[in-house]
Image (spheres, coloured by chain):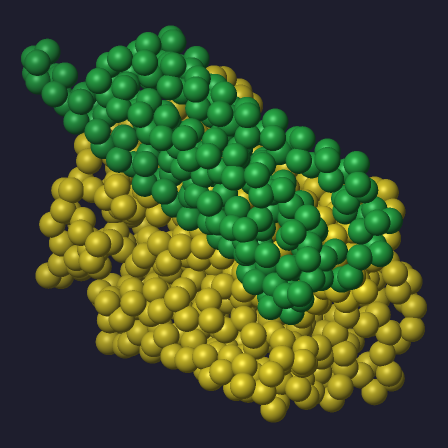
Chain colours: A green, B yellow
Amino acid sequence: MKVPVTNSKNMSVQAIHNERIDSETGKLGMWIFLFTELFLFGGLFLVYAVFRAKYSADFHHAAEELNTFIGTLNTVFLLVSSMTVAMSITAIQKDDKKLALFLVGLTVLLAGLFMMNKYFEWSHKFEFKIYPGSEVLKNLPQGELLFFGLYYMMTGLHALHVLIGMILLLINIVKIKNGTVSSNHYLHLENSGLYWHLVDLIWIFLFPLLYLIT
Amino acid sequence: MNASENGSHVSFLEHKGKYKGILSWLLTTDHKKIALLYLYSIMIFFFVGVILGLLMRIELFKPGETIMDAQTYNGMFTIHGIIMIFIIVIPALPAIFGNFFLPIMIGAKDVAFPKLNLFSWYLFIIGAIFGVLSQFIGEGSPDTGWTFYVPYSAESSTNVIYALVAAFILGFSSILTGLNFIVTMHRMRAPGMGWFRMPLFPWSLYATGWIQVLATPIVGITLLMVIAERVLKIGFFDPALGGDPVLFQHLFWIYSHPAVYIMILPGMGIVTEIFPTFSQKPVFGYTAILFSSLAIAFVGYFVWGHHMFTAGISYGSRWFFSFLTFIVAVPSAIKVFNWISTMYGGSIDLKPPLLYAIFFIFLFMIGGFTGLTLGSVATDVQAHDTAFVVAHFHYIIFGGMGFAFFAGLHYWFPKIFGKMYNNTLAYAGSIVIFIGFNLLYFPQFIIGLQGMPRRYFDYLPQFQTGHQLSTIGGFILFIGLIIMVYNLVYHAKKGAPAPSNPWKGVTLEWQIPSPPSHENFEEIPQIKNHPYFFGESTGNK
């Protein structure tokens, strides 16, 4: 790309201008991508709605099997992590590299705690032979079978997104350390933050639908 | 103004980048080279699809088993559908012409996310390989039809998973292309090019982009659910496990009907560029064409139920979907009237691209009117799942999108390769293709109405004449395709050098040398006029 070179001051103004345009463009792309993610989960929410209407009593029984405490704890983890990732962006804007690193690290830690909880929750169910295709599940009423099918599909797809988000944030830690993400170039962190908020947002809907409404 | 006249011009094909040889293609982020990567790979898969289609036509030449058994035939029509729909018809126009000309037509140096653009191509190739592999390895080629209807797709012992994964990955690639184009148009238009000074091909890509972004994830998650049903035995759609097969059909068509507009809208955009150029006259009803594109994209979301009139949906939803289907016909008709009005009173130059574009209107109208036959509930119940549907679909998709693709190929060929093709051969090819096409598909309308079901490898003797005409048409079409491809491939290397503006077009791509340089524009153009401003006299320049 050609930048009109007149003097060094002018050039840096131009560079900052380009930087701002790039960042707007990158953010717009990320927002549109997040729309597609919403629609991806939207398909599952639609299926949930249809079967909830058809088998409301079965869904009621099955939902009581889920551990509301673990679900609540995980909700808290994700909500706090959404806050820390937002704070990390403010920190990098203020050029506080150390604080930004700490906050992104904390976000990853909270995400890890979420995944750990999820692991215990799932393995607890596996002990009781509640997993797709198991004998116990096959003998349940059809609505409960579908509830657990949806439960595994929705939380599984969500967990996959948590993992992807964690990887994105870990890349950011490297980038902050080597200076690729800095106070005047933080699009990557901002987009990862947006993605992380989406992960949080999806969970905010999954949590009541699966755990709270019984 | 080409290389010989202006020594400083280096075309993008000769541009020396970071990498040499094959890597300069495989690692390129130049939108024009990526477009050519798509062009070459799509042409290869197209001929795979064509040959599968031709084999099916040979099988149907006589009643009973001719060259393959029923199971092989089931595999063939499935893979023919998957290749043609997901690998060719959906991505071709945006990925080839959109990639090449969208940035140039809006006066940009590249798309918004060049690396993502290359990544989309790799996803496309991986998906396409999965699709083709499913035909040849493991348990035998999938036999569900490209629609993957459950419960059969959950039970069939064939390679359905490969095909599902292929469609999922190809969908992802399509989403990223659409996303890239939307952002490009929002952020990278040249100074002075307001939204209403943007040419209409980019506008059609804009409408297409939103469909790609907002509809494709639905089919993505649906395919994942079918995979979960097969692998994990989660019975979303299996009635034996409490699921609902009609729910699958809803989810599938929520994407796959808008997908029809992903296929046809860019095609409409291409012919909208061709009519003004070869009539030397501004396009008639710029705003009407623009808003009809958006209207098609919008209303197209709400008509999916017309695929399911016989699936047991309620009376109320049947008339509702039928009504909306008729509404979609309105913006399509607006476009047809506008194209014809553009030619009216113009100085028409019947070059091969215009000939293809006129064939497009003719075939698209036959496809469109028979679409209304299928869109009204009473007649659809009669024609559902017959060869009539096959004929209608091919008239819209091949006659529409396919002919628009050929039109675009002949229109922009001099710009892409900097060479001219042979006009006589191009006319010959287009006419042979047109005759073969009609002979191939028109008889299917008739035998369809007489009761010939689709997807059957055998038939009653009374349908034999229709099937034989159709098979002969298939071979004529194939010969036409060979003539066309020979003409283009041969002249891409050996043709006479093309001037920068052989058709006297006025949109931006004709104002730069052929082939364009790596950066498209020496300096970003300032837009002062309407995109189809032909000036006071000839309008050249």
Count the numbered circles shown.
Answer: 0
Residue A6 falls in which quadrant of the image? top left
Tell which residue pokes out farthest to the bottom in this image: B378
Q: Decide which of B215, A90 is in the foreground and name it.
A: A90
Q: Residue at x 68, y 77 (%)?
A: B311
Q: Is residue B189 above or below residue B398?
A: above
Position in image of residue B219 (x %, y %): 58, 55
Q: Is residue B433 above or below residue A149?
A: below
Q: Decide which of B147, A48 is in the foreground and name it.
A: A48
| Residue B264 left/right relative to B438 | left
Name the image quarter holding the N terminus of chain B.
Answer: top left
Position in image of residue A36 (x %, y %): 46, 48
| Residue B133 left/right relative to A203 | right
Residue A121 falls in which quadrant of the image? top right
Q: Residue at x 21, y 29 (%)?
A: A20
Q: Residue at x 13, y 17 (%)?
A: A11
Task: Specify whether residue B483 is in view.
Answer: no
Task: Specify whether residue B312 is in view.
Answer: yes
Position in image of residue A127 (x %, y %): 79, 36
Q: Decide which of B448, B533 is in the foreground and name it.
A: B448
Q: Is residue A31 above or below residue A21?
A: below
Residue B79 falls in which quadrant of the image? bottom right
Q: Is residue A83 above or below residue B490?
A: above
| Residue B88 left/right relative to B65 | left
Q: Decide which of B224, B329 is in the foreground and name it.
A: B224
Position in image of residue B519 (x %, y %): 30, 30
Q: Residue at x 49, y 38 (%)?
A: A75
